[in-house]
Amino acid sequence: MSEENSGILVGQKGNVTVVRIMGKGTHLNSHYLKQFLLQGIGEKPRAIHIDLSQCNYLDSTFLGMLAGLGCKMKERSLPSIRLINGTERIIGMLEGLGIDRLFELVKEQAAADGLKELKTASLSLEERSREMLEAHEKLVEVSPQNEVKFRDVIALLHEKTPPSSKS
């Protein structure tokens, strides 16, 4: 597995989209998972289970992406994303940012098998910066106490990221 997509395995089990994060979830791979999951809930809304048993780190961009997806599920009246088998460290990260309430946290559940590596494509620096900015802004939107933690990152990303051409 390459550094960019390392550790993201995906599959469908009945009406559930299953994801397993292996190692680190970071700004290098959050975009690909976001696109995969948004496509899935756009085509045929289904439950999302994310297995964190093999995950040892999530950066703030990845956590912000998860928060955004959690909000989108609530907006569409879909079931909360189920985060499965998270370590104390990972759960602590979610709680520390005040985003744990967006998810259903399940301590022990059998891991799914037959998952395949998430396919990726190249992402421009501009696109990556925009995704990082959106993720950090979402963390502040969900929990305003995060503004102090991420104000400098957001300011820098605003400086470095051209405005979106989307209307």
Image (cartoon, grey):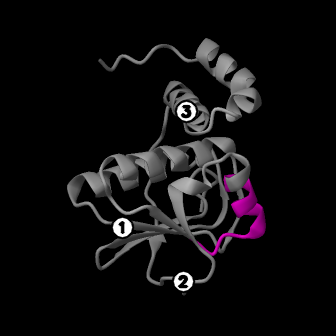
Residue that badge 3 annotates: 141
Secondary structure of the residue carrying numbered label 1: strand
Amino acid at circle 3: Glu
Residues tagged 2 and 1 counted as in contact (Cβ below 8 A) = no
Query: What residue is at 78 percent from the left and 63 percent from the top?
Result: 89
Q: Tell me the distance, in whole angstroms, between the alpha carbons under discs 1 and 3.
A: 24 Å
Judge from the rendering whether residue 113 lies leftward or rightward of residue 87; answer left or right: left
Q: Position of residue 147 (x, y in %)?
A: 69, 28
Which segment did they paint magenta?
Answer: 84-94
Residue at the (52%, 33%) spot, across then down? 131
Query: Sequence order check: which comes first, mark 1 or mark 3?
Result: 1
Nearer to the camera, 118 or 122 = 118
SS assignment at label 2: loop
Residue under label 2, please give it: 111
Q: Nearer the viewer, mark 2 or mark 1?
A: 1
Residue 58 placement, left or right of 113: right
Q: Position of residue 29 (x, y in %)?
A: 56, 49
Residue at (52, 54) in percent of width and height: 102
Residue in front for this viewpoint, 122 or 143: 143
Question: For the residue labelled by badge 3, is the local secondary structure a helix, a strand or a loop?
Answer: helix
Q: Is residue 28 visible?
A: no
Residue holding disc 1: 47
Residues under labels 2 and 1: Cα distance? 16 Å
| Residue 167 at x, y percent in the picture | 29, 17
- Name the spot of residue 32 as percent of width and height, x first: 46, 49
| Horizontal relation, residue 166 to residue 146: left or right | left
